[in-house]
Amino acid sequence: MLGATGGTAAWLINIPLPWMLGPLILIMVLAICGVQTRINRLGNRFFLGVLGFWLGSRFEPAVFQQVVDWYPSVLIMTLSVILIILVNTLLFRWLAKLDLITSIFASLPGNLNAVIIMGEQLGGDGRWIAIAQTLRITLVIISTTVIFFLMPEYDLSGPAIDSQQSQSLLYLPLVPLAWWASRWIRLPMPEFLGPLLASAILASLGFNTDLPGWVMVITFIVLGSYIGGRFYGTRIKQLLQVSFYAVLATLLAMLIAAGFALMTYWLLDIPFSHAFLALVPGGIGEMALIAASADIDPLYIVFMHIIRMFLLMFATPAIGRYLSTRVPRQSER
């Protein structure tokens, strides 16, 4: 209800993506002030699946043929991720005076929960890692939305509250089924990718799986509230200690992403807006949501973020193993 209140207020004052940013900002402020705002994790995952299903309904079979031509973009994205990690690690190490483990894991642009857990296990400061990572995601979502809102060719008003496409509600039971099937075949991020693939397959077969606007409004409210609720338990003093460096790190990461997006545009003739959303270090669902709201085909953005997630899934344990043998734990110093 608090999220819906924030979304309504944002919609009334014409904030971009109001049904997501409104709840996010309001719940974040309340959480920092000490209000218990945690969202049920299972419910959040279900609505993340609904988002994936909605995005999948927008895919066209002809677009899948382009995937094999995107490998140069993958190389550029890999270079941008490496540079982001190096620059932000140096920032946290030299300016914030943090230990090496905390600096590295606060800089990894993805796999938030795994990064926090592994960083703590290796002796890093879990508080710094958690706040820096949560701020990164939140700031990327807000700033990217504002950037696209300021571009006159894009409309980020979000879905309208209507009752059309009500027959598509019959497809909603496919969301948990696709989630379960994706977990069974060990697909990463199954709650999102499973429903997305299921909807994309149905769309390619000619089925209309586009969900009603009011369902997507509820989905945006839940997802925005969940991100804001991550700040629950964060003390204002802790937030102030971390926020300056986290904001600076996020700004540098976005500037790096913008630079490599320009490179992608010059070398591969992929529109800058597409490349920027594909390279900016935000969440898969949120960046795809911004793309879909801006009427940009989200397949390229989703594909690139999935590859980034895979790279970090393999790289993070390797980094952890290396640091565990080279760097003493905090408790051993």
Image (spheres, rainbow, N blue to C red):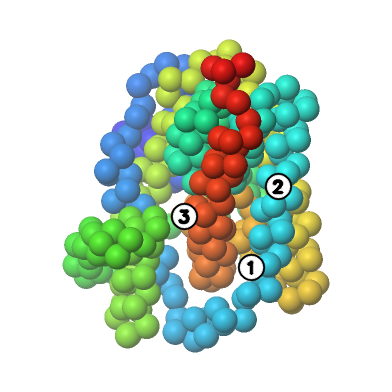
Q: Residue at x 28, y 36 (%)?
A: 40
Using the image, tell me which numbered label, if any, was put on residue 321. none
- Left or right: where does residue 84 sit relative to residue 287? right
CB under 8 Å between callouts 3 and 1? no
Instruction: Tell which tag, 2 or 3, sits nearer the viewer.
Output: 2
> Which quarter of the rendering shows the C terminus?
top right
Instruction: Name the image quarter holding residue 304.
Output: bottom right
Query: Above or below — where is 202 with respect to 85?
Result: below
Q: For this rendering, which residue is in front, 108 or 261?
A: 108
Counting from the top left corner in percent of width and height, residue 177 is at: 21, 63
Going 54% across and 42% down the picture, which residue do you hit?
Answer: 321
Give the crowd class for mark 1: few <14, some 14-19, many >=20 residues within 10 Å: some
* Circle number at residue 74: 1
Q: Residues within 10 Å of mark 3 (few under 14, many from 20)?
A: many
- The amino acid type, in three-letter code, at marker 1 is Val
- Disc 3 marks which residue? 285
Tell me the kind of residue under disc 2. Answer: Ile
Residue 279 visible in the snapshot: yes
Q: Could you say which is closer to the camera, residue 37 or residue 136?
A: 136
